Amino acid sequence: MCLFSGTKIENFPLIYKNQKCFLVFLTKNTYLRCRNQAIMQQNKSHNTRIGWIVTLVGAAMLLLFFLLFYPYHLRHREQTMLFLLNRDWIRETYLNLEHGGAVRLVGDFLQQFFYYIGAGPVIVAALLTMLGVLWFKIVQRATLLIRGRSWHTLSYVIAVLVTIWETGRECRPEYPLASTLQVVGWSALVLIALQFKERSMAAWAAGIGIIAGCWLFDYELLPQSRLYGWPDRIAEHQMALDVEASLGHWDKVEALTAEDRDYNIDIYYRNLALAQQDKLPETLMTRPQNGSDGLFIPVDEQGNYFLFAAAGEAWWAVGDLTMAEHATLLGQIFSPRKRGSRCMKRLAEISLAKGDRAAADKYLRMLKQSIVHRPWTLNHIPEEADHTTVRNPETMEQPKDTLRLAGEVRLYLRSTLDNHPDQAMALQYLLCYDLLYKDLLSFTSDVQHYGCPCNVRLYEEAMLVVMASRPEMREAWQPLVRHETYEDFEAFNQALIDGQGHLDKIQSRFGETYWFYLRKK
């Protein structure tokens, strides 16, 4: 019989007199040790699998969010910066900085690839996933030093919260990618410091790492980019309009504006997209308008770089190179980086269209040193392109410069038509501007001077209103108006009389006519 039966294993004496009891003890001890190791290994494998599942699911969610629900602010961010693969430029812009030059260099290098569809979401999702993994390791290591064992639940919670926080900051359109890189870098330094086994050494190493990170990275980026952010669906929608318009995807712009919104930028881009497809007069009264501001964005002290760059699109479309260049330059100057690929490409196109090769070569030389914009540049250098996609300088060159005053939209359009009578877009915008402004006197003058397309219902309705008050115009305009338009005009007047002037009673039938628009206040 064993003398030590019922005694705990750890209470066995060091020297055993009974060999049989010693063998039983050794067998039990070995079994328990192997079982504990197996359980620990099983728990470790289980935690590892959970960690991989959480990481992959989180990365997929981040990728889908930025790819499907919030992609355009990343592409807009690329349009407001320009990275040149030039040794002198890199040294002057990044390497000569007192601190943070390396993280800015890497951030801008990666950010230029946001130009490609899907590249921005992949890069941002990868960095945010890396940040979450780092903070999971940080909390796991910190709880191990404090409690003696890791706290997995707390590690997951804090890692998710930190990732959500940085994701919100990444949703801001002006947020530099270098800021996310510096947060990742600081987190990596803290994790390295926590590898010390003693708490005091780990605390000192973490403090030194944070201080070193202020020099290695850039502590100025944090306050400049704010400490918080969140998704803004309205801003994302407006940046989608701006990005697609800058790329000339007018069918996508029209699709994005299918839902009527009251924002002026939506009305502006919808009208511009319809005008690019020669459908503006036919649809002008069928969609909500904001007066004449729906055709041109004012370029004044109340604007910002986003509105200035957008304003240049309409002036470029109508062929007023002076106003297009003015608005684009303001968009460039007031942008966060003071340089951007979108504005620089448009300035190069304007300079080529004006015949100013010196200015065009300046912009094209810079764009040619960009990795992502080099193909576009080669396609716009007449000597190197197989076919040029820019406008013909001979047809777009402005023969004279004039002093421009803010708000003289009609004067600019008339000047463009005087220089280039074949600019159908300018005529389309001029007549629609007159009608939205309810200036029938100017409309009459412009039709007499520049002509008017035939079989356009909007113009016919305006002509009937003019002929009703000016009988002398009937001889010239009556043949231009179709018979059904005459009949509808008579029906409108009769319905207005029957309804005693109440527009709500005739809106269902005549709400999309210019006559109804004139009556509205």
Image: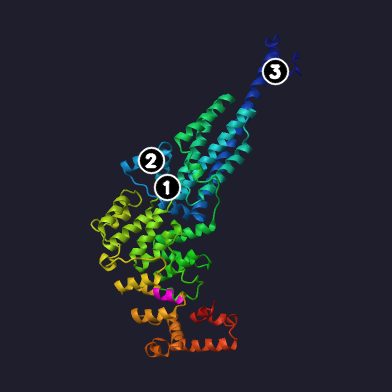
Q: Hey, which quadrant is residue 385 in on the image?
A: bottom left
Disc 1 secondary structure class: helix
| Horizontal and vertical percent position of residue 23 | 67, 15
User: Looking at the picture, how far across and down is residue 146, in whole percent?
Assistant: 63, 28
Using residue 64 as the reference point, say whether residue 114 is left or right of it.
left
For badge 2, the amino acid type reads: Tyr
Q: Which residues are magenta?
A: 430-435
Quarter that holds the N terminus: top right
What residue is rendered at 29% in x and 51% in y?
A: 365
Mark 3 falls on what kind of element? helix
* Residue type highlighted by circle 1: Gln
Q: From mark 2 to mark 1, how far is it between C-alphas?
A: 15 Å
Question: Residue tagged by mark 2?
Answer: 94
Question: For residue 432: magenta?
Answer: yes
Instruction: In the rendered view, tell whether residue 290 sits above or below residue 224.
Output: below
Cα separation between marks 3 and 1: 62 Å
Of the two numbered discs 2 and 3 in the rendering, the one whose residue sits closer to the viewer: 2
Mark 2 or 1, which is nearer the eye?
A: 2
Q: Residue at x 75, y 17 (%)?
A: 5
- Residue 10: which numbered mark, if any? 3
> What is the chief secondary structure element of the magenta stretch?
helix
Instruction: Say above or below: 249 vs 292.
Output: above
Q: Which residue in the structure is indicated by mark 1?
A: 111
Q: Amino acid at mark 3?
A: Glu
2 or 3: tag closer to the N-terminus:
3
Label pair 3/1, CB-CB below 8 angstroms: no
Q: Position of residue 421 (x, y in %)?
A: 31, 74
For marks 2 and 1 on the same chain, the one whose residue lies earlier in the sequence:
2
Visible residue check, residue 119 = yes
